[in-house]
Amino acid sequence: MSQLAADCDAINLSQGFPSFDPPQELTDRITYHLRHGGNQYAPMPGLPELRKAIAEKTRRLQGRVVDADSEVTVCTGATEGIFSAIQAIVRPGDEVIVFDPAYDSYEPSVTLAGGITRHVPLSISDDGFDFHIDWQQLEATVNDKTRLIIVNFPHNPTGAIFSADDLNYLADIVRDTNIYLLSDEVYEHIIFDGKSHHSLASHDELWPRSFVICSFGKTFHATGWKVGYCLAPSELTDEFRRVHQFTTFSVSTPMQHGLADYLVSNPEFYENLSAFYQQKRDLFCGLLRETRFRFTPSRSTFFQIVEYGDISNELDVSLAKKWTREISVASIPLSVFCEKPFTGTRLRFCFAKDDATLADAVEKLKQL
Ligand SMILES: Cc1ncc(COP(=O)(O)O)c(C=O)c1O
């Protein structure tokens, strides 16, 4: 869709990347290390300074003491973390449960490991906007072949979040099984309306079977850097590293040095990130009220789902393309995240853009 947006010179609210730069102190730290010898291979699990800073952040925010040496691995973006965790744990014939709409890298990674992906649709509330796990349906899908359940909260594309209760429901389902959990938490620092993020790492019963995957790309407006990390108990980290070692071996050294410095010196950046994006969400949603889309404001991430049934009944994929060409605003159709279409007439807009771009986009959408 980004390519189509570029071809049509459309405003690109499709792919999830910010239109603003990473903080300058962070790029200054990276530049410093580029110029002062931080340019050779980093250790396979990641620079000790960065792993220590990640461990400290995890202790402070999620109350989990992770061992920086044996339970934290720096990887090439969350995508590599997801891939390596899946290759580490899934064997041919194993079943892996994902919740639709699901991020697109899960299923190909499972297929490559010889696993079988079982898609469980998220439930939609009666008002049509609140997506959540149907715990009974999950329980009915789990069987002896289930090896892994992948969850992603804060959730792309719907902005759904996990509550403390949700962690307990999940614990009820996996108790007395050998099922592992992969928790994609790349939007951990973007959550609105005073709610907090409940990581699987925070839960005593879930943590021993979990791989928690995070990304600095979303947190520091730097999706092109592809630096992320995996938290997992040491036995799982051992397995993870067996794959990571021969997938990428190690991650860009100056980036790791700069991130380590900045995490320690400027925690306020990620602490204020929710407020920063909440202001964007409120601006965007305020403007969207002048259109014929129906929506409720997103609870997290930098994505807003809209329902366009009052404007058109066309399928979301063709409509998203048509509006990119004709209205010059690109969006993502929700059905591309799903095995079977069930999300109806919904599109996703990315609001990680400067205010003028958001205003220009909505001015165009008002024509509909
Ligand atoms: C839910 C989700 N997981 C993983 C990723 C990939 O993160 P990274 O760019 O760090 O590989 C993305 C990026 O859009 C995402 O939205």
Image: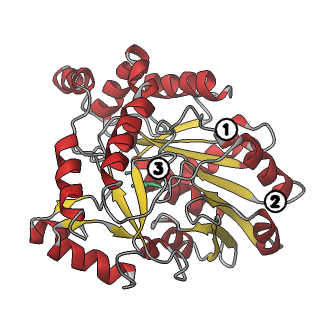
Instruction: Identify the residue at image location x=70%, y=74%.
Output: 94
Of circles 3 and 1, the one toward us is 3
Q: Position of residue 4 (x, y in %)?
A: 18, 72
Residue 254 location, quadrant: top left
Q: Where, quadrant-wise, is the C terminus in this rendering? A: bottom left
* Label 2 sits on residue: 178
Q: Nearer the viewer, mark 3 or mark 2?
A: 3
Question: What secondary structure is marked by label 1?
Answer: helix
**Does any portion of residue 217 appear in the rendered image?**
no
Q: Earlier in the sequence, mark 3 or mark 2?
A: 2
Work out how far the residue at label 3 is from the one at label 2, CA to CA, in angstroms: 38 Å
Looking at the picture, how far across and down is residue 171, in whole percent? 81, 50
Can residue 240 be seen at all in this image of the molecule?
yes
Whole-angstrom CA distance, mark 1 to mark 2, is 18 Å
User: What residue is at 56 percent from the left and 31 percent from the top?
Assistant: 194
Position of 147 with respect to 223 (left or right) is: right
Amino acid type indicated by mark 3 = Pro
For disc 1, the neighbor class at 10 Å (few under 14, some 14 to 19, many from 20) is many
Amino acid type of disc 1?
Ala
Question: In the rendered image, which residue does mark 1 sit on?
Answer: 201
In the image, 330 versus 39, the foreground residue is: 330
Image position of 157 with respect to 42: above or below:
below
The mark found on residue 164 in the picture is none
Which mark's residue is nearer the viewer, 1 or 2? Answer: 1
Indicate the secondary structure of the residue bearing disc 2: loop
Q: Which residue occupies 81% across, 67% down?
A: 136
Q: Which residue is mark 3?
A: 297
